[in-house]
Image (tube, rainbow, N blue to C red):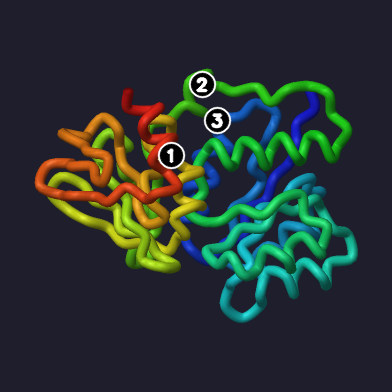
Amino acid sequence: MKVYKCLIIDDEELARELIETHLAQLDGFELIASCKSAIEASTILQQQTIDLMFLDIEMPVLKGIEFFKNLIQKPKVIFTTAYRDYALDGFELNAVDYLLKPITFGRFFKAIEKFLNSENETIEVTLKDKNVIDKDYIYIRKDRKQIKIKFEDILYVESLKDYVKIHLLDEKHITKYSISAFQKQLDNRFIRVHRSYIVNQNKITAYTKHDIEIGKAEIPIGNNYKEAISDSLN
């Protein structure tokens, strides 16, 4: 089996650690270095041949995109960032993929598959842990931290324009996500009941044609969602 040499470049330690954790779940990928700046990574690139680079776009001193554009020998790159607005720039540079933080393993796994396809590899990605892709939690970004939230603890999710509020039993978290993008990170126990609400079906205590109750919370059902909800709950 060919082993692909990887390089991580991100000024946030937690973001680097999360990618390292994801990468460690795969066979055939070797992490050569994890760098906190583009300057530090330059030294590694002069000494090693890198096959795949995970590059944060928004970094101090030298931005990821600027750094990548100036490389003479360009490895395959997967851009990472907390800002959706950079996606177009990443794809214009012929990036393998563009990952929005916090990066779930499922989304990371898809990016790796894209990389292998770009290498004309016909083999499948081999997981060290066969159950890792079915993880039942998500990491969200809050106050420069990556906070782990178990799906089973989520009651419902509320849209706040460019943010979502995640309602748990005893606490709430607000993180930068559109509700549609956040829904894609969840499993099939969650259903969209309104343009502004996603609920955990396992937490529903009562419902009518017009609203859903989860404990003391009353969540409206949008007209466009009534038929799908009826099918899901009956």
Residue at disc 3, secondary structure: loop
Q: Nearer the viewer, residue 128 or 197?
A: 197
Precedes in sequence: disc 2 or disc 1:
2
Precedes in sequence: disc 3 or disc 2:
3
Q: Which residue is mark 1?
A: 186
User: Mark 3: which amino acid?
Assistant: Gln
Comparing labels 3 and 1, the label whose residue is closer to the camera: 1
Q: Which residue is mark 3?
A: 25
Q: In the rendered picture of this protein, how many numbered marks are placed on residues?
A: 3
Rendering coords of residue 160 (x, y %): 36, 66
Cα distance between the residues tagged 3 and 1? 20 Å
Cα distance between the residues tagged 2 and 1? 20 Å
User: Mark 1: which amino acid?
Assistant: Leu
Left or right? Give the position of 69 relative to 107: right
Q: Relative to residue 183, is residue 179 depicted above or below?
A: below
Precedes in sequence: disc 3 or disc 1:
3
Q: Residue at x 40, y 64 (%)?
A: 163
